[in-house]
Amino acid sequence: MEDPLEPATTEPSAHRPWLWPLIGLIAAVTLLAVWLVPEERPLRQPLPRFNAPVPAPAPTLPSEEVATPAEPAPPPPVSIESEPVGDGDTARRLIAEFRDQPDPDLAAVYERAEQLRADAKLTDAWLIHFFAARKGYAPSALVLGTLSDPAYRQAGQDALEESDPAQALKWYKVAADGGDTEAERRLKNLRERTERAAAEGDEDAQRLLLQWR
């Protein structure tokens, strides 16, 4: 028989049935609070975009300024009066006068050329004969053919350095076409000499025969 004076030894939980559910509820609330609190994380730097423009490097200034070379000054103009007066100037002046005439007297042109040749102005004489021969004047063409023909030309009597049978053929034809009988005789003689030289193997003569018509 129990002593009513002794304290009861029964467990507290037997008299508080609501205690364990309360403890479980507190534990659940605590875990939920811990899970919801955000963790402090270090800030991350944003990644660069692939299409972001790359900044250009700053230009570097030269340490010393480079001087631009100055353009050379243009040469001074040449004065016409300072040019030397050479052979042929008289003929050029006369030819300019002849060209100003609507119908120049080619016989007078021929005489002027022969006068210059007599004065040993060979270049002037040749140029004036050339002017008249190009206009079909037969006597001047015969002179040019003679000065080019090795069988008739005289060294030192004209401005040409050496003979030229091809030029002789050309001017003899012009003179012959103008009715000069001496030019026709010269052409025949030149043809015979050229044929002989070609038969002996002269290549220049062979080429000249090909030009003959």
Image (cartoon, rainbow, N blue to C red):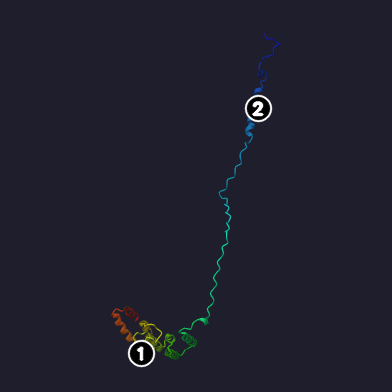
Direction from residue 194 to residue 134 in the image, left or right: right
Q: Residue at x 63, y 32 (%)?
A: 34
Residue 127 image-quadrant placement: bottom left
Residue 104 drawn at (x, y percent): 47, 89
Q: CA distance from mark 1 to mark 2?
A: 150 Å
- Which corner quadrant holds the C terminus? bottom left
Total marks in image: 2
- Going by the numbered disc 1, the residue's amino acid type is Glu
Q: Residue at x 30, y 80 (%)?
A: 198
Please name which of the two marks, 1 or 2, marks the residue nearer to the observer: 1
Instruction: Please determine whether, in this image, residue 117 is positioned above or below residue 200.
Output: below
In this view, the residue farthest toward the front is: 64
Residue 114 is situated, as x and y percent measured from the top left of the image, at: 42, 90
Contact, CB < 8 Å: mark 1 with mark 2? no
Sequence-wise first label, 1 or 2: 2
Name the residue rendered at 31%, 84% in the picture.
Answer: 193
